[in-house]
Image (cartoon, rainbow, N blue to C red):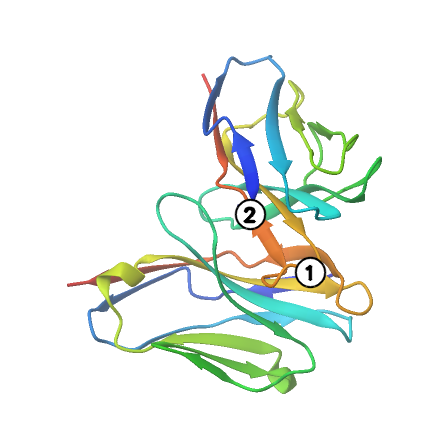
Amino acid sequence: DGGITQSPKYLFRKEGQNVTLSCEQNLNHDAMYWYRQDPGQGLRLIYYSQIVNDFQKGDIAEGYSVSREKKESFPLTVTSAQKNPTAFYLCASSSDRDPYGYTFGSGTRLTVV
Amino acid sequence: AQKVTQAQTEISVVEKEDVTLDCVYETRDTTYYLFWYKQPPSGELVFLIRRNSFDEQNEISGRYSWNFQKSTSSFNFTITASQVVDSAVYFCALSEGRGGTSYGKLTFGQGTILTVHP
């Protein structure tokens, strides 16, 4: 079955360390997205990519970086510049062919310890 | 810029009550898509409905119904005869149309926490 795989489900990071969250899709979707969720604040867009080797900043890109070297993969790096990284991170992809428009992963919960 | 407002932060009802979740949106696009998602405690987003800007027909799916009114930029969601299993966070979202049926960025509302008591 096609879908989006996010790994790991839970991640712990020490302050000052970079960490990379994985997002892989086998849906052949062109566009991919990263969202951050904090309690009471809904989901906010971090970065998005409409095609391979191209990506754009979302509303809260500071302290994050991404790459899109392959259509299937859109990893998100949370850098030490991100002052408050503890949050729930959701990856998504979209395509005209998707009956739901967007498909979401199951999320990664990042905690800074 | 797009914006989605869900004015109700939390709603608490007793089982079998009807409940309406409000959603108001702002966009300059003439082509756009509106969505509702359910997020149970496990965190994944469950798709409920998608509506494009040219289709103002209301929709009913079992106990769920949606009222789309372009004139007031609203896309409200009603659960009839609520059940404990309906307890979750519900998000309304707006996607810009990139031409044709292509999807762009998805902008979410703050979410409404619905608690249904037995």
Mark 1 lies on a secondary structure that is loop
How far across and how far down the image is residue B39, in percent? 42, 53
Q: Is residue B2 above or below residue B29?
A: above
- For the point 75% across and 68% down, which residue is it? B101
Dot 2 or dot 1: first in sequence order is: 1
**Residue A109, placed above or below residue B39:** above
In the image, what residue occupies the spot 44% across and 44% down?
Answer: A39
Tell me the crowding category of disc 2: few under 14, some 14 to 19, or many 20 or more residues within 10 angstroms, Cα based. Answer: many
Split into 4 quadrants, where in the image is the C terminus of chain B?
bottom left
Q: Which numbered disc covers residue A85?
A: none
User: Residue B44's x, y, as percent?
Assistant: 45, 46
User: Horizontal and vertical percent for residue B52?
Assistant: 66, 75
Return the residue nearer the eye: A81 or B14.
B14
Q: Chain of mark 1?
A: A
Q: Amino acid at mark 1?
A: Arg
- Out of A81 and A109, give the one closest to the viewer: A109
Quadrant location of the N terminus of chain B in the rendered image: bottom right
Q: Say what secondary structure mark 2 lies in.
A: strand
Q: Mark 2 and mark 1, same subunit?
A: yes
Tag 1: Cα neighbours inside 10 Å, few (<14), some, or many (≥20)?
few
Q: Residue A111, relative to residue B20: is it above or below?
A: above
Q: Which mark is residue A97?
A: 1
In this rendering, position of residue A42 left or right of residue A25? left
Q: Nearest the camera: B84 or A24?
A: A24
Badge nearest the viewer, 2 or 1: 1
Gap in Å between the C-alphas at discs 2 and 1? 15 Å
Q: Quadrant of residue B28?
A: bottom right
Circle 2 residue: A104
Q: Chain of mark 2?
A: A
Residue furthest front as drawn: A1
At x 69%, y 33%, the residue is: A73
Say what amino acid the circle numbered 2 marks.
Phe
